[in-house]
Amino acid sequence: MLVLGIETSCDETAAAIVSDGREILSNIVLSQTDDHAAFGGVVPEIAARAHAHHLDAIIREALAVAGKDLSDMDAIAATGGPGLIGGVIVGVLTAKAIAAVQQKPFVAVNHLEGHALTARLTNDVQFPYLLLLVSGGHCQLLAVEGVGKYTKLGGTMDDALGEAFDKTAKLLGLGFPGGPALEKTALNGDPHRYNFVIPLKGRPDSNFSFSGFKTSIRTEVVKLAEQGDVTPQMKADLSASFQRCVGDILQERLQWGIRQFKERWPNGTALVVAGGVAANTYLRGRLTDIAAEHDLALVVPPAKLCTDNAAMIAWAGLEHFRLGNVSSLDFNPRARWPLDEAAA
Ligand code: KG4
Ligand code: ZN
């Protein structure tokens, strides 16, 4: 069984082909980073136009690398949301057109579900598992009981974790996208030079908050700037301290979430981390320790399958398709689509 996946919900134009044997035959990702860098963030209209411009060629490339033809596909999957609506429309319309012409089923995939199920493609993780989803727009802790079966245990009350990385990187003038830039800068820094606020400490639930944490970093940077130049070493120390505090926050918050998960799903054995922030090597190390402390196995997909890609969309589409869940060609692209809500 082969599925073509299409991802266009943010600033990556991507197409991939995966098989039910968990093989990634091709995985093409065109990042628009350079188109948006001058603006310090993703500009939705620029993103939508770039998707419309490049998607056909990216799909052609995915087919060529896999050595397959559209007629070899068993289903066509595309991100149906949540995301920047212009881009989502481009991907959904393209997938519907291919499906209609080739007379193949179309599957609208929730982008978050793509992240959530990637660990089954890469590591064959069995249900149920605990999922920490940390991306540019999301920070959630969920129990994954099956395909399409998610129970949210907690989420952020304000900012997403990726956003905290991006905004802190911007504050320190490290460039865009912020997560990878901050991680690189932190390599030369002292993680204990600065201390920042650890929000919600001791609160017995699995929610997250990053706004007070972000403000405490801003306050520190403003104070340093008033005293003189913020040197490259200071930036490295601030970045390393930021990451160490993120690790401390996750450790503190996850202890409650893991307790909740184990009470309700005692046969669950894995903590899966997904989304762009899961690409961070330092946090992977911290999360390995956190999982071990609670007798869970940590599963994190390879970095290039943590950040946005179409292999995860093809895979989630495949998981739905083989259960008989396909979408109508009337499916409406969705800017908002909570993971615990079924396709409309
Ligand atoms: O999942 P993703 O590619 O797109 C969304 O669906 O949001 O996540 C993007 C987010 C951005 O905030 C980016 O800065 C962050 O993931 N990110 C990282 C790293 N790579 C990407 N954050 C920390 N360390 C990284 N190495
Ligand atoms: Zn994503």
Image (cartoon, rainbow, N blue to C red):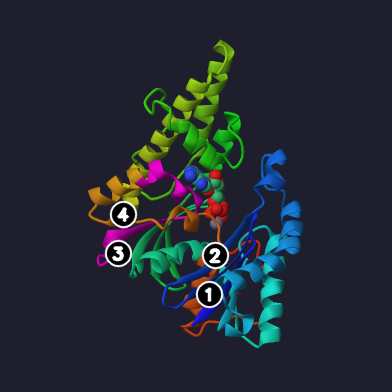
Nearer mark to the viewer, of 3 and 4: 4
Task: Give the number of callouts.
Answer: 4
Q: Residue 173, image x and y in percent?
A: 60, 29
Q: CA distance from mark 2 to mark 1?
A: 15 Å
Judging depth in this view, the residue of 5 and 256 nearest the camera is 5
Which amino acid, mark 2? Answer: Asn
59 with respect to 209 (left or right)? right
Q: Amino acid at mark 4?
A: Ile
Which of the labelled discs sits on residue 42, or is there none?
none
Seen as rendered, the residue at the extreme bottom is 103
* Image depth: mark 1 or mark 3 in front: 1
Q: Secondary structure at mark 4?
A: helix
Query: In this picture, which residue range is highlighted in magenta?
Result: 260-284
Query: From this viewpoint, is residue 248 visible?
Result: yes
The crowd level at tag 4 (other Cα within 10 Å; few <14, some 14-19, many 20+) is many
Q: Earlier in the sequence, mark 2 or mark 3?
A: 2
Which residue is disc 2 drawn over? 27
Crowd tier of the residue under label 2, counting other residues whose Cα lies within 10 Å: few below 14, some 14–19, many 20 or above: many
181 up-or-down from 225: above or below: below
Residue denoted by label 4:
258
Q: Are marks 2 and 1 in contact (CB under 8 Å)?
A: no
Instruction: Give the CA separation, mark 3 to mark 4.
Output: 10 Å
Mark 3 is on which residue type? Arg
Q: Which residue is mark 3?
A: 264
- The answer to whether 193 is drawn above or below residue 122 in the figure is above
Element carrying mark 3: helix
- Among the 4 quarters of the image, the one containing residue 300: bottom left
Residues 58 and 248: in front is: 58
Mark 2 residue element: strand
